[in-house]
Amino acid sequence: MGIIEDWIIDYLAIASRQYLGNPKVPTVFVYLLDENGKYQRAKYQGDEIIVSRIFPELKLTVEEILKA
């Protein structure tokens, strides 16, 4: 579909431990479309600053999203 960037916010930490780790904690997954048409996943938790290719000036952490 050509979506350049997609965010999945797992605020209830319901994904498997394979994706969230152990212990399971709320996580933001950012999927970025690369030059080969494949999605590359980045995982952010806690006070990590989420990196966005679409909005490079955006400076949000997972904690800030969950508090909103």
Image (cartoon, rainbow, N blue to C red):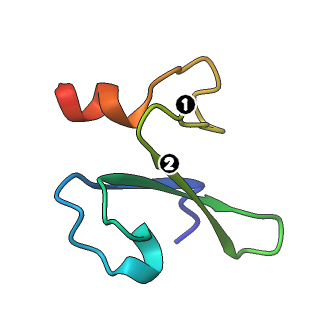
Q: Residue at x 21, y 71 (%)?
A: 14
- Residue that label 1 marks: 49
Question: Residue 22, how many percent across, how many down?
Answer: 39, 70
Q: Which sits in the foreground, 18 or 40?
A: 18
Circle 2: residue type: Tyr
Q: Is residue 40 above or below residue 64?
A: below
Q: Which sits in the foreground, 2 or 53?
A: 53
Q: Quadrant of the C terminus?
A: top left
Q: Secondary structure at mark 2?
A: strand
Residue farthest to the front, as pictured: 23
Q: Residue at x 66, y 39 (%)?
A: 53
Label drawn at residue 18 = none
Question: Residue 48, how many percent across, how many down?
Answer: 53, 35
Q: Is residue 49 above or below residue 23?
A: above
Question: Are the residues at dot 1 and dot 2 in contact (C-beta closer than 8 Å)?
Answer: yes
Dot 1 or dot 2, earlier in sequence: 2
Q: Quadrant of residue 25?
A: bottom left
Mark 1 burial class by Cα count in 10 Å: few <14, some 14-19, many 20+: some
- Residue that label 2 marks: 44
Q: Secondary structure at mark 1?
A: loop
